[in-house]
Image (spheres, grey):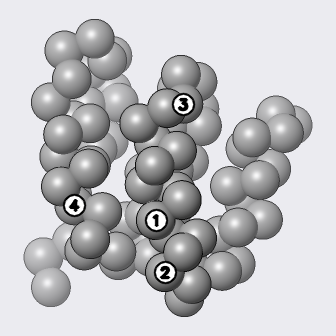
Amino acid sequence: MNVRLAAVDALGRLSGNAGVRQSMVSALTTQDSPMVQVALIDYLVDARDREAVPAIQQFSGRTDLDSFLRQRAQPRWDN
């Protein structure tokens, strides 16, 4: 398993920590691995981190991304 994916998985248990969530938002903009990017997006959506929405929206608007990644970055919660 990729070390970065393992780190995202391990940190997923700390979704209640605002500092961890903010680090995940920052990592989203710097990671170049699509698998890690998907894991980060899923983490932020699962954590229901509304503060991450602007970063995810900006990420989804990047034209250099594969269409799957752009679609995955669409917010998937309404409440």
Query: In the image, 2: left or right of 30?
Result: right
Marks 4 and 3, Cα distance to the nearest angstrom? 17 Å
Query: In the image, 41: left or right of 2?
Result: left
Q: Residue at x 52, y 56 (%)?
A: 24
Q: Which residue is mark 2?
A: 18
Residue 75, above or below 37: below
Residue 5, above or below 47: above
Marks 4 and 1, Cα distance to the nearest angstrom? 11 Å
45 vs 18, nearest the viewer: 18
Q: Residue at x 70, y 67 (%)?
A: 11
N-terminal label among 4 and 3: 3
Marks 3 and 2, Cα distance to the nearest angstrom? 20 Å
Q: Which residue is mark 4?
A: 53
Q: Give the residue type at disc 2.
A: Ala
N-terminal label among 4 and 2: 2
Q: Which residue is mark 1?
A: 22
Secondary structure beneath label 3: loop
Marks 4 and 2, Cα distance to the nearest angstrom? 14 Å
Secondary structure beneath label 1: helix
Secondary structure beneath label 2: helix
Query: In the image, 78: left or right of 70?
Result: left
Q: Which residue is mark 3?
A: 31
Labels 2 and 1 touching (C-beta < 8 A): yes
